[in-house]
Image: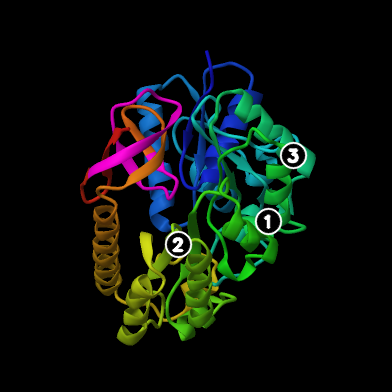
Amino acid sequence: MPVETITLGCRLNFAESETLARQAAPGDWIIVNSCAVTSEAVRQTRQAIRRAHRRRPDARILVTGCAAELEPGQFAAMPGVDRVVGNAEKLATNIVPAGNQGHVRSFVAVQTGCDHDCTFCAIAPARGPSRSFAYADIRSAVERELDRGAREIVLTGVDITSYEGGLGPLSERLLRDIPELQRLRLSSLDSIEIDETLFALIAGEPRLLPHFHLSLQSGDDLILKRMKRRHNRAQAVAMVERIKTVRPDASIGADLIAGFPTESEQAAMNTLRLLDDCDVVAGHIFPFSPRPGTPAARMPQLEREMVKARAARLRERAAQRRSAWLDSQVGSVQRVLVENGGKGHTDAFAPVALEAPSNRLCDVRVTGATADHLIGVPT
C-alpha cells in the first residue's frame, strides 16, 4: 500500500511531502506534514490527524513538520499517532525536496531554515538556521521534474532570497544551464534581499514569470520595527515601483498581518493603504496569532474582535483590488498554462477557467471575469 501524505502550510512542506513519500517504505502509514505559522494552522493539523485516524483507524500516523518540531508532546499523545518526527529528522538525506511530481507545476526547494528573528514568527526556531542546497542537487531536481512532465518550476523554501550566493545568480544559472526550463516562478520574496542579478532577470528575462509575492507584513514603520523586519514602508513601495517600471506586466502579491500587538488605528490604516501603494492584487491576510515563545506573544495584545475586524477590512480591500485587476484583463489575450479540471494560470498568476487539454501552454482570449478568476477561450 502506498504511503498517504497529508500536507498543511507552505509550498516547502508540499515539496518535502513528495520526498517523504518516495523515501518511505510501503506500508499502512499516513504522514501528516504539519504547519505552525499560526495557531489556526496548528488547530488544523490536529483536526487533520483526527480525521485521518477516523477514516483509517488501523493506519499508523507519523506527524512531522513545524508544529511537530515545536510541540511534539501534544501530537504524540493523540490517538493513532505512532511517531512524531521533527524537521531536523524529516529528511534522512540532504537531498533537495522536489514536489508535485507528475504535475504541470512543480515546486523545487532551494533552501530551508531562516537566520532572521522576526518577533511574531515561530518558523525560524522550528526550521533552524538557513541552509542552502547545493546547486548540483537543485539542477538535478529541476531536470527530474521537467522529465516527469512539469511545464513550470517554482523555486521555494523558507527564505529563498537568503540563498547562499544569491537567488539571482542561482536563477540565472538554472536558466542558462537548462534550456528546456521555459517557465521559472519564484515563491515568497523578502523585498529587501532582492539582489541586482535577480532584478536584472525581472527586467529582461521572459522565462522568469512576472508574479512576485513579497513578505511585507505591515505598512507602518513602527510596527515593522516591532516586528524586527529589515525594511521600512518607503523601501517596500520603492521596490514595487522599480519592479513595475521595468516589468509593467508584473503582478504583486503580499503577506500582511492585521492586529499586531500595539497596532494603532493609524498604523492599521497605513497597512490598508499599502495595498494601493504597492499595487497588491494577491493579498494574503493573516490576523495576528500569538505563537508561544515568540517576543510578540509577550507584547500588549489587541482584543481579538479588533484583530478580526482589521483582518476583515484588509481582506475586503484586497478582494476589491483583485476583482478590479481581473476585470481589467477582459478582452486581452493571455498566455496560460493549462493544468487540469478546466483551469490554468496566466504568466502573472491570474487563475483562468477554460476548456482546453491539460498540460499545455496556449494563448487565451479573456472573455469574462468573476471575483476570483478569469474566463477564457483558447485562440
Mark 1 vs mark 2, foreground winner is 2
Q: Looking at the image, tell me whether mark 1 or mark 3 is earlier in sequence order.
A: 1
Amino acid type, mark 1 = Leu
Q: Which residue is mark 1?
A: 167
Q: Is residue 39 above or below residue 221?
A: above
Dot 1: element: helix
Dot 2: element: loop
Give the percent coordinates (x, y) of residue 144: 66, 28
Residue in the image at 53% along x and 65% along y: 246
Which span of residues is magenta-colored?
Answer: 345-367
Amino acid type, mark 2 = Pro
Q: Which residue is mark 2?
A: 248
Q: How many marks?
A: 3
Q: Which residue is mark 3?
A: 177
Q: Is residue 257 above or below residue 134?
A: below
Q: Looking at the image, tell me whether mark 1 or mark 2 is earlier in sequence order.
A: 1
Mark 2 vs mark 3, foreground winner is 2
- In the figure, is residue 294 to the left or right of 352? right
Query: Which quadrant: the C terminus?
Result: top left
